[in-house]
Amino acid sequence: MPFLEGEKSRLNWRKSARSVNGGNCTEVASTSGIIVVRDSQDPDTLVLSYPADTWRSFVSAVRGGALDIQS
């Protein structure tokens, strides 16, 4: 089932515990096997959606350092 824009207000949005008040953050929620991401500073704008397996792969890559910027 695809994410429907009208579902935004009913989702349980989560923000990282490392997020600082007033910081540039994203919020994440899940629904029907889909992960949705939005800008916490402007929650009424565009929401990005990903299949749950894709999101898990992304998080795993981040945690494993695969996406670290090399200086």
Image: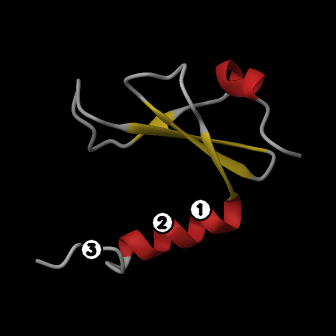
Nearer the N terminus, badge 1 or badge 3? 1
Name the residue: 48% across, 73% down: 60
* Position above or below: 55 against 67: above
Name the residue: 37% across, 71% down: 63
Please name the colour scheme applied to the rendered image. Answer: secondary structure
Q: Are marks 1 and 2 in contact (CB under 8 Å)?
A: yes
**Looking at the picture, which amino acid does disc 3 mark?**
Asp
Disc 1 to disc 2, C-alpha distance: 6 Å
Marking on residue 59? 2
Marking on residue 68? 3
* Position above or below: 56 against 49: below
Q: List the residue tagged with mark 1.
A: 55
Question: Does dot 2 land on a helix, a strand or a loop?
Answer: helix
Mark 1, other Cα within 10 Å: few <14 / some 14–19 / many ≥20: some
Give percent across and percent down for residue 57: 56, 72
**Looking at the picture, which amino acid does disc 1 mark?**
Trp
Question: Does dot 1 land on a helix, a strand or a loop?
Answer: helix
Name the residue: 23% across, 25% down: 21
* 40 to the left or right of 53: left
Q: Quadrant of the C terminus?
A: bottom left
* 6 to the left or right of 60: right
Image quadrant where residue 56 sits: bottom right
Give percent across and percent down for residue 17: 32, 42
Q: Are marks 1 and 3 in contact (CB under 8 Å)?
A: no
